[in-house]
Image (cartoon, grey):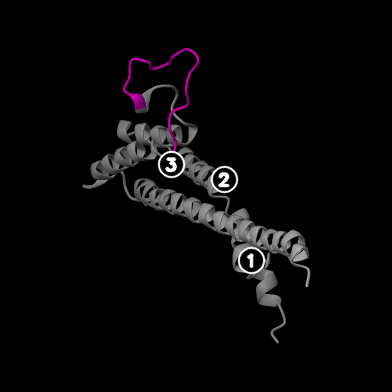
Amino acid sequence: MDYSLIGTVAIPGLSLIVSVSTAYYFLRDRRHARYQMESAYIENLLAWHKEVTFCLMRLEKLPAKRANAAEDLCVLSALIEQGRFFFPNVPSNQNHGADKPLAYRGYRNLVLEMLVAIYQEYRSGSTDREINEKYRKSFTSAVFSIVDPVSRISELSQITAKKLNAGQSIRDYVNAEWR
């Protein structure tokens, strides 16, 4: 048996196979880890969105002249402050707010600007519920665009090898023939 053939062909070939399979599993695992990190961020963002939405709905649907309306405004103000971590201020070329603390320099992010506008409306006592509803829906749409559930469901379907979204409407689902 020619040992030089084993040393020059078989061992490098085996090393190549091991290297390629290791690289494949590393990249697959890295994709999964990235998805987990994104999921943790999205989970925190959605938890914050839920709190903001509940607060906005209380302000929008319940009477303005009630005992805990001021408490809801305090909660909304605190949620806006928390939102600065998800939506930091946009830096300004003109050094807008350079004299302010770090989190307040630049221009307020559009998402938080909507919440601040709602807060100021309710605080002043002159509330236009239709405009605030539009701001609330725009706020939800902005968070929706970041979360991008359609792409996330597709990516999750690929990772889990399960079809999670059939792309059906409620009418399609109800009218489907059951087998």
Q: Residue at x 39, y 22 (%)?
A: 105
Front label number (2 vs 3): 2
Tell me the residue that label 3 is attached to: 129
Query: Which residue is painted at 58% across and 57% down in the image?
Result: 26
* Residue type pointed to by label 1: Asn
Tell me the chief SS of the magenta region: loop
User: Can you identify the residue that label 2 sits on?
Assistant: 145
Upstream in sequence: badge 2 or badge 3: 3
Q: Residues within 10 Å of mark 3 (few under 14, many from 20)?
A: some
Q: Quadrant of the N terminus?
A: bottom right
Residue, disc 1: 165
Q: Tell me if residue 1 comes above or below residue 62 in the rendering.
A: below
Residue 21, position as x, y percentages in the image? 65, 62
Residue extending farthest to the bottom is: 179
**Residue 151 to residue 10: above or below:** above
Q: Residue at x 56, y 59 (%)?
A: 29
Q: Residue furthest top?
A: 94
Q: Quadrant of residue 106?
A: top left
Helix or strand or loop: what does disc 1 sit on? loop
